[in-house]
Image (tube, grey):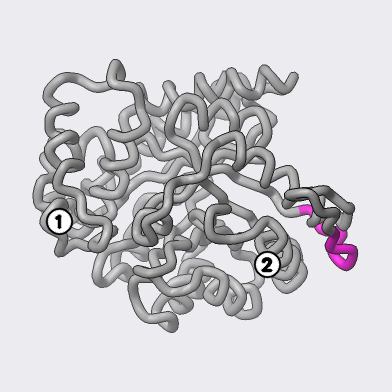
Amino acid sequence: MSATFHLGILPNRPMQDCIEMGRISEALGYAGVWVADSHSIMRDAYSILSVLAAQTSKLLLATGVTLTVTRHPAVLANSWASLQELSGGRAICGIGVGESAVHNLGLQPERLAALEHKIGVIRALLRGDSVEYEGHAIQMPWSGQSVPIVMASSGPKSLQLAGRIADGVLFQVGSDPRLVQYALDHIGAGAAQAGRSLADVKLYMRVATAVDADRDKARREIKGYASIAAGTVFATVPREYFGDELHADLARMKAAYDYAAHGSNQSAHSDLLTDRIFDAIAVACTPAEAIERFSALAQLGIDGFVWPAGMPDPYPYMETFAREVMPHVTASSDPSASS
């Protein structure tokens, strides 16, 4: 069977450009778009998703990802029920503890126990049920919606929680199959705690990607997003999964990280990305190399790949990937491949 591919949109560009990226991605055959939610440094994700709900017909519409630190569960439930209705059932609530969105406001990421509780509240509100939250009974009786909740995870505890409670997991642990297997092992362990299997959890892998005949050019184009991914992986994946040299490279880059330049190709910290980091974190290479790498990852049982188009001019890369890579990546037909 074929793997599905989704586009990540970073709204650090004009709104109309983000919307055009979504429309073009549908025309090119991408399965969905995941729009980053990071107030202060990016445009509003929900505005973009609402327009795309009206201007597309097949595209899955997700946040990549939203957060509960700055958005009340009732506000999130209302947004997702509305998007689900507007899109005709194409909404996916990608949610996490928060990173740049909280750091740039001087706040702290959500604790996992609090996130688990709030996800339960959001689900109840989406169904139209009455639920107690902070001592008050709250309800959204008009909804009656079911929206898949996909939890963004990278660390062991977060991956296990996602495997236990979420409809799907959007994990970002790099592109090395050994790191991916680490994520799958923890998701599977969490799923087992809830009496289900890894096959019951939708597996989305977010990976920094750029494909071009010029391999070096591809790497230059995504160094902004690759630095985001590298920082996340360094902060969340246990030390024993890294070789000493890779760990030292990542530590050097993370120490210089500037959240005010989150995702920027012009950031000083992105200049500290080494080839060793690129090889472990990203898929930045020629189309032939990308087919080989994604096919190997698909054999692990990944349901969908999300690659954030953070380069200054994403359109040629979106088209090259759609034409020269997507049709040629195949996943295992063996349902036990991811167990």
Q: Give amino acid for label 1.
A: Arg
Residue 214 in the image: x percent, y percent? 14, 54
Magenta span of residues: 139-146
- The reply to whether residue 266 is visible in this rendering is yes
Q: Are marks 1 and 2 in contact (CB under 8 Å)?
A: no
For disc 1, the marked residue is: 220
Q: Give amino acid for label 2.
A: Ser
Identify the image quadrant of residue 40. bottom left
Residue 251 in the image: x percent, y percent? 17, 34
Identify the image quadrant of residue 316. bottom left
Q: Residues within 10 Å of mark 1 (few under 14, many from 20)?
A: some
Q: Residue at x 36, y 54 (%)?
A: 103
Q: Which mark is residue 192?
A: none
Q: Is residue 240 magenta?
A: no
- Callout in the foreground (1, 2): 2
Q: Nearer the viewer, residue 49 or 22?
A: 49
- The reply to whether residue 3 is visible in this rendering is no
Residue 228 in the image: x percent, y percent? 29, 49
Q: Which mark is residue 79?
A: 2
Q: Nearer the viewer, residue 259 or 226?
A: 259
Q: Nearer the viewer, residue 9 or 70?
A: 70
Q: Which secondary structure type mostly characterizes the magenta part of the structure?
A: loop
> Is residue 253 shown left or right of residue 119?
left
> Is residue 320 shown left or right of residue 20?
left
The quadrant the N terminus occupies is: top right
Q: Residue at x 64, y 33 (%)?
A: 201
* Above-or-below relation of 245 to 91: above
* Above-or-below relation of 151 to 32: above
